């Protein structure tokens, strides 16, 4: 009996790993492991910070990005690989103090940070944002009432 060889995930535009939509830690870890170069170590660090900050955490991969949420409160954060950086998006980021720097008038409630290879990660501030974001109602992916699927 032969053992099937696992293929590496396809990297999409900007190096973003193509991982099938699925709930749980396993697809998130597959995404993180497939992140190219220095981004994988950053993905592991971010995942560790999020898990430490939010004890009752839900994880999933949706739209080729890891999502983090709390049952009954929705998704509060996602990460996404781009060519030169990793984007960390807080879905209700306008409610966070201090306000994360990234955002445009079109982004409505979302705010984000872009982390580049040589950036020094302010883990204390990031953890503060993660803890705040997990306590407020997040994005539900479009609840059944709104034509989508809730967390």
Image: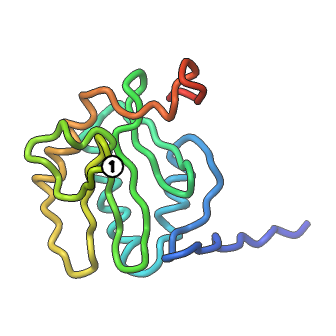
Kindly identify the residue that appears in the image at 65 percent across and 54 percent down: 20
Q: Secondary structure at mark 1?
A: helix
Q: Return the residue nearer the eye: 34 or 3.
A: 34
- Location of mark 1 (residue): 107
Residue 19, percent from left and from top = 61, 59
Q: Return the residue nearer the eye: 105 or 129.
A: 105
Kindly identify the residue that appears in the image at 87 percent across and 69 percent down: 2
Residue 16, percent from left and from top = 51, 69
- In which quadrant of the rendered image does the N terminus lie? bottom right
Kindly identify the residue that appears in the image at 71 percent across and 73 percent down: 7
Q: Residues within 10 Å of mark 1 (few under 14, many from 20)?
A: few
Task: Give the residue at the far front of this rendering.
Answer: 105
In the rendered image of this protein, does residue 31 appear above or below residue 118?
A: above
Left or right: 63 in relation to 126: right
Task: Give the residue at the far right of this rendering.
Answer: 1
Residue 57, percent from left and from top = 38, 35
Q: Return the residue nearer the eye: 151 or 105.
A: 105
In the rendered image of this protein, does residue 14 appear above or below residue 133?
A: below
Q: Identify the colour scheme used.
A: rainbow
Question: Residue 113's quadrant in the figure?
Answer: bottom left
Left or right: 83 in relation to 22: left
Left or right: 80 in relation to 144: left
Residue 58, percent from left and from top = 44, 36
In the rendered image of this protein, does residue 111 appear above or below residue 6?
A: above
Left or right: 92 in relation to 123: right
């Amino acid at each position: 009996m032969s053992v099937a060889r696992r293929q590496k995930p396809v990297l999409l535009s900007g190096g973003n790993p193509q991982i099938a939509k699925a709930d749980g830690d396993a697809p998130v870890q597959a995404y993180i492991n497939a992140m190219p170069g220095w981004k994988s170590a950053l993905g592991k660090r971010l995942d560790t910070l999020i898990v430490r900050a939010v004890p009752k955490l839900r994880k999933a991969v949706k739209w080729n990005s890891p999502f983090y949420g709390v049952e009954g409160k929705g998704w509060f954060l996602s990460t996404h690989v781009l060519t030169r950086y990793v984007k960390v998006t807080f879905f209700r980021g306008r409610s966070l103090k201090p306000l994360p720097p990234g955002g445009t008038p079109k982004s409505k409630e979302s705010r984000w940070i872009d982390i580049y290879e040589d950036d020094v990660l302010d883990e204390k501030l990031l953890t503060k944002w993660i803890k705040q974001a997990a306590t407020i109602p997040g994005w539900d992916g479009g609840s059944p009432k709104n034509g989508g699927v809730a967390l």
